Amino acid sequence: MPSNRVRKPRSRDNRAQTSSTDRRRTRAALRDALAVEMVRCTRCKEKGLPDCRVPPGDDVCSACARVNNTSCDSFGYDSSAVHLVLSQKRKLDKEQAEADQALGAALAKVDRLRRQRQVLEAKALQMFDQEGKVLREQERREASVAAPSSTGPSDSVNSSSVDLFAGVDFLSDVWLQAGPGFVDGTQSASQGSG
């Protein structure tokens, strides 16, 4: 006989006695009812499921939630994969910045060495020109000493002593013309070409 009795709702104690499996099934049913169809995640594609449904505000589809799969990529990729890619990108950006800095330092060094070489070559050319001038002057003096003029007064100094000291005059002229800084290379171009 059917009873006309009204069923009483279960008390909290009775609800606590329901199994976790029952609660999980109830939650899955609610999840499915609220879920919105999305692009299929990798697991749903592998299992051949026709659709992949994700509840609003959640990042795991219903099928993955049923089997406790937390790496559902229904929104493209799971967050751990995104974090991994971002950390690798940051690492590569840092390495590239360090390499750019090292390249800049190397290019600056090459530029500095190129300028130093140009200064050194200019100094060597200046020394070569000065040596040529000194050599021509020495040859002129030697020629004038070797062929005394017939109109000038004759010196009582013999020619061997003149030849002996000709180099001394040459050296004193070089040192007088050179000026300060000639030896250590700090002499300017205007001082050396006098």
Image (tube, rainbow, N blue to C red):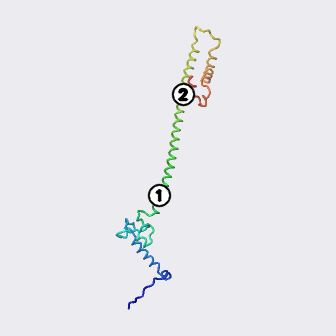
Residue 150, relative to residue 16: is it above or below? Answer: above
Residue 5, how many percent across, how many down?
Answer: 42, 88
Tell which residue pokes out farthest to the left in this image. Answer: 50
Most foreground residue, 65 or 162: 65
State the quadrant of the N terminus: bottom left
**Disc 2 crowd, CA 10 A, few/some/many (<14, 14-19, 20+):** some
Q: Earlier in the sequence, mark 1 or mark 2?
A: 1
Residue 142, relative to residue 55: is it above or below? Answer: above
Q: Name the residue tied to disc 2.
A: 126
Q: Quadrant of residue 29?
A: bottom left
Q: Residue at position x 55%, y 17% from top?
A: 140
User: Tag on residue 86?
Assistant: 1
Which amino acid, mark 2?
Answer: Gln
Most foreground residue, 193 or 54: 54
Residue 180, relative to residue 111: is it above or below? Answer: above
Most foreground residue, 89 or 187: 89
| Position of residue 125 in the picture relative to residue 162 (left or right) | left
